[in-house]
Image (cartoon, coloured by chain):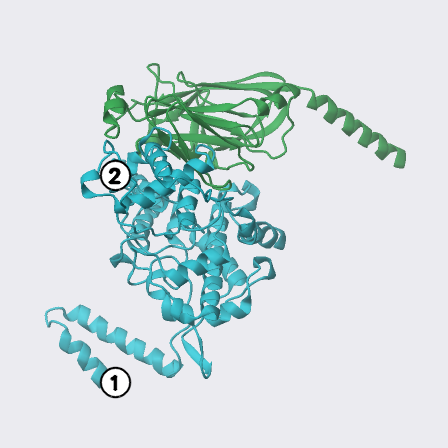
Chain colours: A cyan, B green
Amino acid sequence: MTKAMSKHTSTQPVSVRPVLSLHVAASLGLLVTVLAVGCGPTPAASFRTNMVMAAKQRLTTDQERQVATIVEAMFGTPDEPVALPETGLDEAKLLLAAGPVRSDIVGRKNGLYREHCVHCHGITGDGLGPTAAFLNPYPRDYRPGVFKFKSTERADKPTHADLKRILHNGIVGTSMPSFALLGDAQVDALVEYVKYLSMRGETEIKLMQAYFELDDDAQGKLPETREFLVDEVLAGVAEKWKSAADAAIPVPEMPADIDLAASIAKGKELFHGDKANCVKCHGVTALGDGQANDYDDWNKAIVDFGREIAGSREQAAKTSTAEMSPDELAEHKATLAWLEKSRQVLDGDSLRPRTIPPRNLRQAVYRGGRRPLDLYYRIHAGIHGAPMPAAKGTIPPEEIWHIVNYIRSLPYEFDGELGADRSMVASGR
Amino acid sequence: MKFGSFAAVALLLCSTVVSAEEWGTLKGRFKFGGAAPQAAALKADKDAEVCGKHKLVSEELVVGADGGVANVVVFVRDKDVKVHPDMAALKNVKAVMDNKDCRFEPHVVFVQTGQPFVIKNSDTVGHNSNVQTIKNPAENKIIPANGEATATFKLDEAIPAAITCNIHPWMKAWVVVRDNPYAAVSKPDGSFEIKNLPAGELEFQFWHEKAGYLGEATVGGKAEKMARGRKKLKIAAGENDLGEIVLDGKMFQK
């Protein structure tokens, strides 16, 4: 006890006495708590509320609490996850992935998520783990339920196999490593847990958004009925995951006898042409140096919300309260409190927004996979959440294959051939 | 006694039938309260040779010379509202959003669930249209020069959804998705009109891009609070004119 205290005091500069004594008091308090609890395991882990969404929806603390209570009742805690039958999730798999890292049977480990994923993706799956701010791109936030690299249509969920592929291969060009060494059962459990965190996050968002649509007689409280919470909200979220396998992108096979050189030439024309318009963002050089410098959907939402808050704060600071009625003054104060809270939430619960550069197509580094099929998916459906739009409906399948062939040829084009006006020689590759 | 209650039910049925055949029009004109700010110029630095020549300005808040506020959205909140026979066919008419001169036209479009929503491109440059709906699946389609894409929405949206172009990030427009034909977007002079509403009490919601849901308005000289932009109005058969609806300029300063 004294050792811990002296360690603290020795590192503190002498000049900050009041702070210092507070510090000592705090460590004493902590020590008392630890003594009272005993030397057991670390305190129970808890999920973080989606504070950015709560601030955006301007929820009251009571409403935040109601959502937290409902979500915990539906999904449990990081140590004790719950999978209601409506989710279609396998609770046995979740238990393998959830909780602190531990082992009860020789050779079997539990708590896989906290061993392998939590540092970046966070205990809540919000992409706000301690390492997140240091990574580029940022780790995925599972809570909106949006995944980029999949075999399904843009707005649909990835299949179980899609997520397993990502865990097996990692995401090349990002900080996401391969977990192939874990073995199938463990990867399977982690994928199930990612789906669980995603469903939990989406349910939380949907509940927060639901306040807005409440009738006045609901008095700002969500109905705590099974019909609303489970049959409507939860089942709605789960349904998209369950139907993911049916949302597979139809891919007509590339003709086996395709004239590759001709296909590449057609792809090149499409790439640089007005219809597919790839050149706008990926550039005439295909180095990803086109004119695009937009945000992805998540970062854009943060940027927009940040602007709104900053503008409103500026406005509020200029507003004179002298002639306000008591009611108006109370409302004004409530707005100021909300603006300050929103500012803090954006500071603490979101990462600094970054624009998303279009991919450099000459590096042969494809985040969503390097198979021709993967490139076909990316072009057909675009990339959900990213500026990359869908070619579906505009570019017929055989033309998508031409673009795929052209893109696959780009890393091997001679240096001297960079640029749209150079014709490519297919032979001698 | 039994007979009596039957008679009452019959009477009730009759009266609903009668009122269902009465339809009213709601109209009004939004006016900006205070001095309207100048619209900021947009930096059209992408495809500058095409987009740069249009002298684009922000359309977040469009106030006419006479103070009319354009692009205010008014819609009926009630579920399962009765639809006038003349209005039912509107669902089959295409709603169109055009990419023209590197901006969207119109700035706010109203689409019913199931109604074909065509996004076209009259420009010589390609666009994409990223539609940020909440309940409906996300869409982000390539819209080639002189091309078009069609979408339909299955579910209604409580909040208008933003449409942006990622190639030209200054471009922004809105789509209002409702499951009935009763919505309007105010014109450049600030006026709006919703025809053929079923007579009786209806709850309306008022929204503007910059102000969000309109929390207050001065209707016919009387200041009214509207929590979350909602207002219950009694629609009488025939014309219901709200007259001038003054929106305090403070609401738009964000």
Q: Is residue A126 above or below residue A180?
A: above
Q: Nearer the viewer, residue A3 or A152?
A: A152
Q: Determine whether the residue tagged by mark 2 lies in a helix, strand or loop.
A: helix
Residue A1's label in the rendered image is 1
Residue A314's label in the rendered image is 2
Chain name for mark 1? A
State how many labels appear. 2
Amino acid at pointer 1 = Met
Which residue does the image show at 51% across and 40% down from the upper left?
A: B136
Q: Is residue A79 above or below residue B33?
A: below
Amino acid at pointer 2 = Glu
The quadrant in which residue B35 appears is top left
Image position, residue B131 (x, y; %): 43, 36
Q: Nearer the viewer, residue B33 or A178?
A: A178
The quadrant in which residue A119 appears is bottom left
Image position, residue B150 (x, y; %): 49, 29
Q: Is residue A359 above or below residue A276?
A: below
Question: Looking at the image, is mark 2 or mark 1 earlier in the sequence?
Answer: 1
The quadrant in which residue A48 appears is bottom left
Q: Residues within 10 Å of mark 2 (few under 14, many from 20)?
A: few
Give the spatial CA distance, label 2 vs label 1: 49 Å
Taking the image as shown, residue B12 lies to the left or right of residue A135, namely right
Taking the image as shown, residue B244 lies to the left or right of residue A337, namely right
Image position, residue A64 (x, y; %): 44, 54
